[in-house]
Amino acid sequence: MDLHLKDKVVLVTGAAGIKGSIGETIVQSLANEGAIPVIICRNDRGYQYQKELNEKGIDSIFVKTDLTDPKQIEKAIKTIEEKYHRIDVIINNVGVNDGVGIDASIEEFIKSLQLNLVSYFAMVKYALPLLKASKGNILNIGSKVALTGQGGTSGYAAAKGGVLGLTREWAVDLINYQIRSNALIIAESYTPAYENWINSLENGKEKLKAITKKIPLENRMTTPEEIANACLFTISDVSSHTTGQFIYIDGGYVHLDRSLLPQ
């Protein structure tokens, strides 16, 4: 199936994570479809990722940006406009489940919101004229934490709840410009960072087994590739009449009653 993503300029925030992370996997998937991935992240790994893509003949740039700083976000959008003169899609992917709980300081809570929520708003705000011109679309990466809670992570939970609110608000605000706005909701995905966390625990194997047992479909975590595939479908013209939706890529984690599932 042709997703019609060739030569589309697609911005992906938080995309310079460890190889195999969700953002990096999305970038690779975009490149495979002939899109122009723009990596926006504060990590210098982005320079290497850009180099690797360019050496394969893929048009891509890395714009180093501290996504907690709206001024840097504005500058990044200007840099992209100067190079490509267009933006077709924004994938707001950046996010850190930072453990800022109810016992954290107000300053720590605000800092969590700056990265996990305010950066989403700033990206769309500054890119909006270009999105209007291209009749582009927005995809926000959400989390089940916004719906289920987790404990000990008030900042992240509040931010991800806000992300879902923005997704629907923008779908309404921008519908007259034919700009679609959707969110992908992830539960448990076995990323390199997740693996590092599991390996840091004394009872890591037991913890991993307990978590995967609670995932209804196949008792396994969602892969970054499955998330990337869903992203590409949602932002593509193949999904041209989908807006304001929360799309769950979670193996049934959020909605299915585990007590009714076969053991």
Image: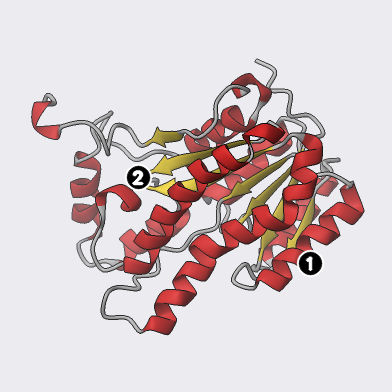
The reply to whether residue 202 is visible in this rendering is yes
- Which label belongs to residue 7? none
Above-or-below relation of 34 to 26: above
Task: Look at the numbered disc 2 and give the secondary structure of its residue.
Answer: loop
Compare residues 57 and 86 and report the one nearer the observer.
86
Q: For residue 71, what is the image quadrant?
A: bottom right
Q: Residue at x 58, y 53 (%)?
A: 19
Q: Earlier in the sequence, mark 2 or mark 1?
A: 1
Disc 2 marks a residue whose amino acid type is: Ala
Quadrant containing the N terminus in the rendered view:
top right
For the residue marked with disc 1, what is the amino acid? Answer: Lys
* Looking at the image, residue 35 lies above or below residue 118: above
Circle number at residue 187: 2
Image location (x, y in percent) of residue 98: 40, 69
20 vs 100: above or below: above
- Give 64 or 179, whichever is nearer the viewer: 179
Extreme-top residue of the structure: 1
Q: Which residue is mark 1?
A: 75
Q: Residue 93 in the image: x percent, y percent?
A: 55, 51
Left or right: where 148 falls relative to 196: left
User: In the displayed structure, does residue 44 sit left or right of residue 84?
Assistant: left
Q: Residues within 10 Å of mark 1 (few under 14, many from 20)?
A: some
